[in-house]
Amino acid sequence: MIAHVHDNINYLKTKKGLMSWLVTVDHKRIGMMYLASILLFFITGGTFAFLFRLELWSPLKDFLTPDQYNQFFTLHGVIMVFLVVVPGIPAALGNFFVPIQIGAKDLAFPKLNLTSLYLYWIGAGIALWSIVAGHADQGWTMYAPYSLSQNPAVLWMMVAAFILGFSSILTGLNFIVTMHTMRAPGMTWYRMPLFLWAMYATGIMQIFATPVLAITLLLLLMENFFGIGIFDPALGGDPLLMQHFFWFYSHPAVYIIVVPGFGITSEIIAAFAKKDIFGYRFVAYSSVAIAIIGFVVWGHHMFVAGQSELADTIFSFLTFFTAIPSAIKVFNWTATLYKGSIDLKTPMLYALQFLWNFTIGGLTGIILAILSVDIHLHDTYFIVSHFHYVAMGSTMIAFIGGIHYWWPKMTGKMYNETVGKLASITVFIGFNVTFFVQLIMGSLGSPRRYYHYWDQFQIYHQISTVGVVILAVGLFTALINLIVSLWKGATAPANPWGAKTLEWQTDSPPPLYNFTETPIVTHGPYAFETEKA
Amino acid sequence: MDNAKTFWLPEKASTFTSIVDPAFDLYLWISVFFFGLIVILITVFTFKYLRRRPDQLATAQITHNLTLELSWTIIPLIIVMALFFVGMKGFLHMRVAPSGYMQVNVKGQKWSWSFEYPAGAVNDTLVVPVNTPVKLAMTSRDVIHSFFIPAFRAKADVLPNRWNAIWFQATRTGVFPVECTQYCGTNHSYMWTAVKVVEPDVYQEWLANASDPGKGKTPEQFGALLYQKRGCNACHSIDGSKGVGPSWKGLYGRQETTNMGMVMVDEAYLKESMMVPTAKVVTGFQPVMPVFQGVLSDREIAALMAYIKSLK
């Protein structure tokens, strides 16, 4: 109603006070609130990991009992998966940049967007309450019938996952509708930044995979209140059915986790190599391909669970296809660097360590699809390491890189570049020391989720624990650097990196409606000039 | 063959190691190649094309190259399809036990394993003969567990509502650890045991002893155990009270009236009553006792008789 008054005032200053944030429908403010919440949970989940990693310094009791250890890894898993990496990039950075990158004022459904934030907070509250009050220790995978003995913790955790799922569905739906209907004049599909293609692919998965969580919850409720045997063998149910339901959601969720990271990496590499992304369409399509293939590979989590050999074989076959779009992306990003003008600023350091980590995460995933080898590696530290290379080493590294990349835009402040680089290198070293050694102890036969382990594995555990200390130092350095910049940082220019996508064509931070004039798009997202010979 | 643990894999002690380990090693080298390729390219490009002046631009904008892109789509596709076949072939071999296997039933429960042999032996460690295919039919008494022998490269989940099976053939004697690899609660990480691989003659001797629960007991003690285990106690009291059958208290040496006349209860009559219970039925009781011919061994019969004799 008074939009024109605020045309040139940045979104942080349009209104003041707590209430102006809590009832805002501005996608940027909602994105910032998501970002703060997710980072808070990241610290919480990380603290639990840090503590049980210290406990694993020796094979016997250091300071946690077996039950506490079991609860800690459950807390770590549930918080990190459901509250951090799954919502992570789309809810925080996607919310902020999807409308701006297509030249729109906001998302298609701003109130729905605020609703999804509140659902996230409610779901997070229930999840934390269920695991703390219920002393839940069933791990984030919640396999029946062990998890059923954890009643009512497992029921509440499913309720939480269901509500969080709804939050996720609403965000995905909002992004898809926004990209279909609100692109600025001239913003064709193939002029969209690759981050948006990644958000689109993620949206598809969020919408189609998440409802299965609701079905699972409904069946659990029926079992619990009417005694209908569905998952509990004591009632004649089948625990494998629960695994099927769980992975039908959770496998696409793994790609919900990683695909947004692909998007950020594309943006950063283009901006800091001053290059058009090599094979833009292959990279865009490969995000969509991963989203589709991701729906038909869930059975590879169950190669030793007792499904038929035929099912094992089919799922193995299909799983290998996920390697192709992932490989395409890595090769294309590498090729983008060729003949570029590469600037090793903090975001680029994160993008390059993403390439390193994701190559390891991807390669260690392919070996798990080899049926005969998976029999040996299943449920060992090898798996733990593999998915941390993807979820932490790839997704969270891309997320942190994206935060650095867009920090000047979001806050209007420049962080200290030297500290940022040092933190990035420390994170890289800490992460790889922590997790590479877990690949070795896993293939040597050390099972995951072991409080007590054999002496021969102690050296690996100790290296891993040293790594996690380095990692924690790096992450806190990065965080403090960002926070300090809010007070001490230099004022950010509109386009500090010389990037070409639309968010850099508006002010830092952007005004309430993102652009003072609707932008007209005449070229692709990475139309960098070439050096004159 | 070198059976020792390598940098990546545990010691080798079953035929599966010749399936899993070569596939693992092959893949390891493929990974090293591609990882090395990516890292070298990134490093070379980064330093060769490093921005040295703030306004430096890229020297070329190459948007795509179809040949290159198709080649790094198709070559990985061929490689992963080959890996699929390697994995499937090995896997099907690992899932289907050859004929002539020896079966042991495995029961998992929080937080222990028990191994049941066809001859009746029940043990808390798995003892198997070397160079013999062994099939494990496995089920759980409570939650899901997983049975993993790293040195054999063998693993399967153990579920409460079904029987999952694995098989293996040990290639050398020794003691190899067994781990539970599916999270099952407080003492999950303590749910481990061992598989002991021995020479066939040692195995036979062990099995005979393990199948013989009377070992180390006096005949009376063994008889008391059988009185419980064979269900004698359901009908025969040992305190003189009347049950479905006569009490065993003071039975030996007594004169009984039967449908065939007076009988002196001695070894001959006791054995006859176990083998052919209806031959001479004591007056006042129904001829309902099950036949134990072929169920009880001579040692068990002797132990039961010794036990009855001791109940004065």
Image (cartoon, rainbow, N blue to C red):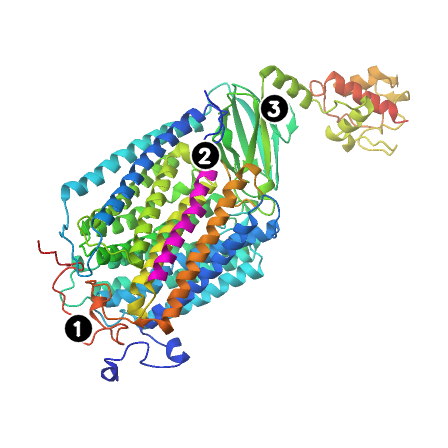
What is the distance, in whole Å, between disc 1 and disc 3 at their CAs? 81 Å
Mark 2 — residue? A376
Nearer to the camera, A126 or A261: A261
**Side of A102 where B220 appears, left or right:** right
Mark 2 is on which residue type? His
Magenta-colored stretch includes residue A420: yes
In-image side of B69 versus B288 (left or right): left
What is the magenta range? A418-443
Tell me if A388 is positioned left or right of A492 in this view.
right
Q: What chain does badge 2 belong to?
A: A
Q: Residue B243 at x, y = what percent?
A: 82, 33
Where is residue A453 drawn, in percent x and y? Answer: 56, 41
Front position among marks 1 and 3: 1
Q: Amino acid at mark 1?
A: Thr
Is residue A520 covered in magenta?
Answer: no
Which numbered tag is attached to residue A15? none
At 56% across and 21% down in the image, what residue appears?
B173
Image vertical order of residue B237 relative to residue A49, above or below: above
Among the 4 quarters of the image, the one containing residue A225: bottom right
Query: Is the N terminus of chain B in the top left, top right, bottom left or bottom right quadrant?
Result: top left
Q: Residue at x 48, y 46 (%)?
A: A464
Q: Is residue A301 visible from the viewing direction of this image?
A: yes
Which residue position holds label 3?
B118
